[in-house]
Amino acid sequence: MNDYTDIIRKWATDDRHSGLLDKPDGVGEVGLEAGEAGRKLAVRFTLQRQGERIDKIRYQVFGCGFTIAACAAAADLAEGEAFAAARTIDAGAINRTLEGLPAERDYCAEIAIRALRAALDSADRNGATVQSEHRQEEHGPHISENDEVFRLLMTSENRNAMPEEDRRMFAGVIALGAAEPLFLIHALGLEKRELVKLLSVYFPLVNVDNLLLLSSHATQLAPEVNSDVRSIIRSHLPTEAEGVTLQTSAWLADILAARAAHPGHLWVAMGFFERPELTAAIRRHLPTLAEANSQNMRWKRYLFKQACDLNGGVMCKSPSCGDCSDYDLCFAPE
């Protein structure tokens, strides 16, 4: 959690209101509808009322530390308040409590508020669970084979006879990064010299300056890369590899870390067309990382859980995955 502020870190590890309440008067959920469970970031609030006041409130989060912090702040603001006052708590109040979420994480506060208000609605409906939809970006592929940059790369001569599956891997994420309102090197997590090297190996006839001209104009900052996630991935670089093989593994490691900072599924953020392509790429170039994820946990969940464990944080509500009631949220297909 090195990329978190001290205040957000404090709230993310504050477990005073975490967990579930027995016999709650209200249950509010976001991202746990039948069609969404296991596919989206999810939050659940349970509360007990005393008259028109919230006596106790608890939350569960299946997502990042920013969302955990936002829910902890929301619960702290709401407990003991009248229902009418609790309904006035908004994302701005959470942001002020946390002394500011990163701009690209503002949605975490919105999710917490949706779940809180759903729990309040539930209490007013005799405790029937209220599910609020959280509209994230579509989870399907964000590029197609007709994408201009993708076609430029894939139709260029494969002069170095590199594997087509690896050309496809890099073409997809480069094309996706080029379409985003970010500097391409920041979208990929690579220095320009490394991008030039990558192109010289996999797409030697494509000029990096021409590629940059086709990229969208940068109007936003890229999400901050979690340094622990990057270190964890790079710790699995194959020690026996050298030359292009080692370079490819290192490029993939840095790109994975950068793309893991984006919302949504990692396979989508990597520009793959299908889910299994992500695991296949990791098996090819970071085999010990693939082996370490022995239970086939969703990749983003796995990486951030490792980072959280490294720093002594709490991400799971059960010490044993097999005993956890939310197993399907973590182990649904990537």
Image (cartoon, grey):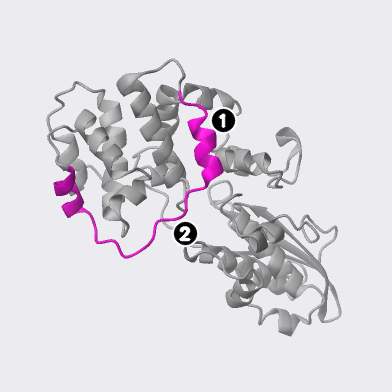
Q: Is residue 84 above or below residue 319?
A: below
Res 136 label: 2
Q: How far apart are the alpha carbons under marks 1 and 2?
A: 24 Å
Within-10-Å neighbours for mark 1: few <14, some 14–19, many 20+: some
Q: Nearer the viewer, residue 305 or 168?
A: 305
Residue at image x 62%, y 54%? 65
Horizontal side of 163 relative to 12 (left or right) equals left
Within-10-Å neighbours for mark 2: few <14, some 14–19, many 20+: few
Query: Magenta stretch: residue 50 in it?
Result: no
The furthest residue to the bottom: 84
Q: Residue type at mark 1?
A: Asn
Q: Magenta stretch: give its range.
A: 208-237
The furthest residue to the right: 50
Q: Are marks 1 and 2 in contact (CB under 8 Å)?
A: no
Horizontal side of 246 relative to 314 (left or right) equals left
Instruction: State how many labels appear.
Output: 2
Q: Residue type at mark 2?
A: Gln
Residue at image x 27%, y 40%? 193
Residue 57 percent across, percent down from the top left: 79, 66
Residue 1 percent across, percent down from the top left: 61, 49
The residue labelled by disc 1 is 296
Q: In terms of secondary structure, where does tag 1 sit?
A: loop
Residue 81 percent across, percent down from the top left: 79, 79
Query: Magenta stretch: residue 235 in it?
Result: yes
Q: In terms of secondary structure, where does tag 2 sit?
A: loop
Residue 165 percent across, percent down from the top left: 29, 27
Q: Is residue 129 visible?
A: no
Residue at image x 74%, y 76%? 124
Q: Quadrant of residue 121?
A: bottom right
Q: Quadrant of residue 77?
A: bottom right
